[in-house]
Amino acid sequence: MIRIRNMLALAAAILGLAATPLAAQSYPERPISMIIPLGAGGSHDLNARVITSVLPEYLGQPVVVQLMPGAGGQTGTAAAAQAQPDGYTLLFTHNFIGQLQQHVARLPYDPNKAFVTVARVNTAQPVLVVRKDSPFKTWEELVDYGKKNPGKLRFGHSGNWGAFMVPGLALLKEVDVKATLIPYQGGGTVMQALLAGDVDFTFAFPSVLSGQDLRPLLIVGEEKILEGVPTTTELGFTTVSEIGVMHRPVLAPAGIPEDRLKKLREAFSKLNENKVYKELMDRLGENTAYMDGEKYDELRRRQSEEYKALVASFKE
């Protein structure tokens, strides 16, 4: 009897030692939802389709895209902030929604406390575009018309204080041009408006430019990603270059168990080394400027302070 009890105790001890790593390994046990707080057809949607086609290789479960546009990105962001921090809800967003909008609107959450970064997937330089049949063939022609016709230029953007509004406002301020701002729910819908002739100019990312009847006039940032198109850095608009580039992070609700956060971070790190993933992103015209979660959390805090100063400058 004593021997049997000892054997049972030994078995229980072995099972107890095995329980923790097995529990950690069992995550995820069901599909993971990736909320995008933007509309269909935009650059985030296109990037996410690539990410979610390869990422399950490292997680063992599907990652399902859930588009939740509205309120300049805050509808989906608030939903993610309120989700259970169990690792089954992620947010694929950008720095303007994540770190700027807190300075222009009262939010039901603190962006710096509500989320932790899994990884920054990449960065993107917005490109100012018009229709291919637009009368504006250069950036200078657009500016000249705007100066001579205050308020007549129609600037379509993807949401208030979003990825297109910020560089657009900064540029208009640099050249002292007044335009009529028209908001849309995401990059896909504003692109439809441009192609329909409802607005005169907007911005687009490389993944959206291909195959569209568009004429690029100006690149935001330093890198010359399109031949024959000037950059804001070349034209001396250094402030626009600094604040206008988009960062695309994947965030998780704060409070996520450390073992699950670690597994997600490892999965995105491996994703960034995947050759198929890199090829697909290259076909989209996107980079893979990966940054690990801890480093991007530090950058998020700095971004918050930079955008606070930016918003204050427009209120002066």
Image (tube, grey):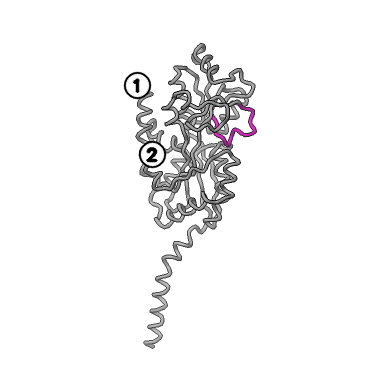
Answer few, some or many: residues within 10 Å of disc 2's Cα (few below 14, many 20 plus, some between 14 and 19).
few
Sequence order check, earlier mark of 1 and 2: 2
**Mark 1 or 2: the one toward you:** 1
The residue shown at (39%, 30%) is 104
Count residues near mark 1 (Cα–Cα under 10 Å), then give few for <14, some for 14-19, many for 20+: few
Q: Which mark is residue 100?
A: none
| 206 drawn magenta | yes
Q: In the displayed structure, does residue 112 sit left or right of residue 198?
A: left
Image location (x, y in percent) of residue 253: 42, 48
Q: Residue at x 50, y 36 (%)?
A: 124
Residue labelled with disc 1: 316
Instruction: Indicate the amino acid at tag 1.
Output: Glu
> Which quarter of the rendered picture does the C terminus lie within?
top left
Instruction: Give the magenta part as a residue range.
Output: 202-214
Q: Tell me where residue 208 appears, x and y as whole percent.
A: 59, 34
Q: Which numbered circle lies on residue 108?
A: 2
Task: Residue 145: say if magenta.
Answer: no
- On screen, residue 58 versus residue 301, left or right, reads right
Residue that appears at 55% across and 42% down: 47
